[in-house]
Each structure stands twice: as C-alpha cells, then as structure tokens.
Amino acid sequence: MRYFIKLAYNGSPYHGWQYQPNAASVQETLNNAASVILNTPINAMGAGRTDTGVHAREMFAHFDYNKEIDIPKLIYKLNSLLPKDIAIYDIITVADEAHCRFDATKRTYQYHINTVKDVFLQDQSWYLNQSLDIDLMNEASKILLNHTDFQCFSKVNTDVNTFDCTIFEAKWQKLGDHLVFTISANRFLRNMVRAIVGTLVNVGMNKINLDDFENIIISKSRDKAGTSVPAHGLYLTKIVYPYLDENAFLKINTNL
C-alpha cells in the first residue's frame, strides 16, 4: 500500500530534503522516525529537493507499507518522535502508482525579505537594508510568464533533460517592512527561485532595466543573471496534485 505524507519543516538545521552522507537531511530524519515506529525500513520519496537551509510550509512524501495504518496514531507518534523543526500534518492512502514527485502539476515557492533588522526573522527572512522599486520588480516578474527556457537561472552542471518550465504566477507584495515574492510553476530547476529573486532585486535597485532582464533570460547564461539570494528566505508553500483536492487531507493540529 502507498501512503502520502503531508509535512512541514524549518530547513535551518538541515542540508536540504534529500539524504546526504555525513550531513543531516529531512528525508533521513523522517525515514529513521517512521522506521522505528513501523518496525520496518521506510524509505520516503519526496516531492522534490530543497537546498540546504530552505524551508517547507507544505511538502509531500510517499512511502510503501504492506499493512493498513492507524493514521491518527501514526501522526501522533511521528510528531512525538521527530524533532521540533519537522511537523507531520496528515497521511492518506493513495493508489499504488501515485507518485508525489512525478504527479505534481504545480509547485509554489515564496521568498521573504525584511528591509528592517528583525532579530526574530534572522533565520527565516533575508535582511536587505535597501530601497527597492517594487512596481518595477513586478513589471519584470511579468516578463517571466512570456518565457519557458530558464537556463540562465539554473545551477550550472545540473543533470536535467530540459530547462523548460511553465510559470503560472510571479509577483511581489509589500507588507510594511516585509517583501514577499510568490512564484508558481509546473517545475523548478535547481537554484532557480533564488537566482530569479537575485536578478529581480537588481531590477529593484535599478542596476538593470526591464530590457536587460529579458535579455538575460534569452541569453541562457547563468553568468549574466544575478547572484543567488540566501537560502533561509525561501519557502516551498504549495504542491498540487490532479487527484487530490483541498479536502483530501485533514487539518491536523500541528501542536500534536
């Protein structure tokens, strides 16, 4: 039987989602806890990778187990055994062929910037004490929707078959001293969001104009794009599956 897990994590203590030799990962931590509770080796497959220090407000993973599970009991035990920076929201039974990575049709990330120093956000948001033209950054964000090849924002030497991604949404919001960039796409390349944000910040600082921004995309050159912004401001916030609606998962008390 195959089960989907809905979880969240603070990525600060981890070297990303995926297992890393000699380094703590979310995947390994989850697998170890589930293996202890279910008394059998569990190897959970994640919906995607997140890099070192990146957070997830909503992540999915799947695992196979040949028995029916008392789901509320397993959720409780996992949340009790897992460290405080990983929370299990829910678990549901899915079809044996369901795949949390390959079946996802839409993913959403948010990047957070605070323009005033805040000691409570130092590991959750990038502190950037600069004046940014948000309107201009939003104009540049619209340009992303006109393109599909984003090689210029991809980490170099990445083993992928295509750099094509379909971006559905890209926009900035200003909430007082806090800036939030939201971007949704069918898939993302490694380091893509952080490179996009770094390049859009250059637009907001008037270091490059809108034509420059589009020419960077057309060039396909990572060297022409902006630097990658710090990982701790990035959050995976939403993953969509065609066979799961908003009511498929229960709203589980994360304080369990």
Image (tube, rainbow, N blue to C red):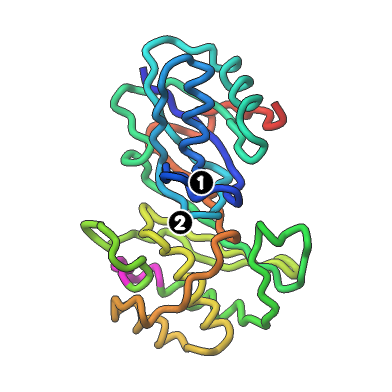
How packed mark 1 is, by other alpha carbons closer than 10 Å (few <14, some 14-19, many 20 or more), is: some
In the figure, is residue 142 to the left or right of 123? left
Residue that appears at 41% across and 39% down: 46
Amino acid beneath label 2: Ser
State the CA–CA distance, disc 1 to disc 2.
Answer: 9 Å
Q: Percent x, y for residue 195?
A: 45, 70
Tag 2 or tag 1, which sits nearer the N-term? 2
* Rendered image quadrant of residue 84: top right
Q: Is residue 237 above or below residue 254?
A: below
The residue that mark 2 highlights is 184
Decide: is 232 above or below 69. below
Q: Main secondary structure of the magenta part?
A: loop
Q: Position of residue 58 (x, y in %)?
A: 54, 42
| Marks 1 and 2 in Cβ contact (< 8 Å) | yes
Q: Which quarter shows the N terminus?
A: top left
Range of magenta residues: 144-151
Q: Is 115 or 180 nearer to us in this picture?
A: 115
Helix, strand or loop under label 1: strand
Q: Position of residue 225 (x, y in %)?
A: 41, 79
Q: Quadrant of residue 86?
A: top right
Q: Residue at x 55, y 36 (%)?
A: 7
Q: Which residue is mark 1?
A: 238
SS for tag 2?
Answer: strand
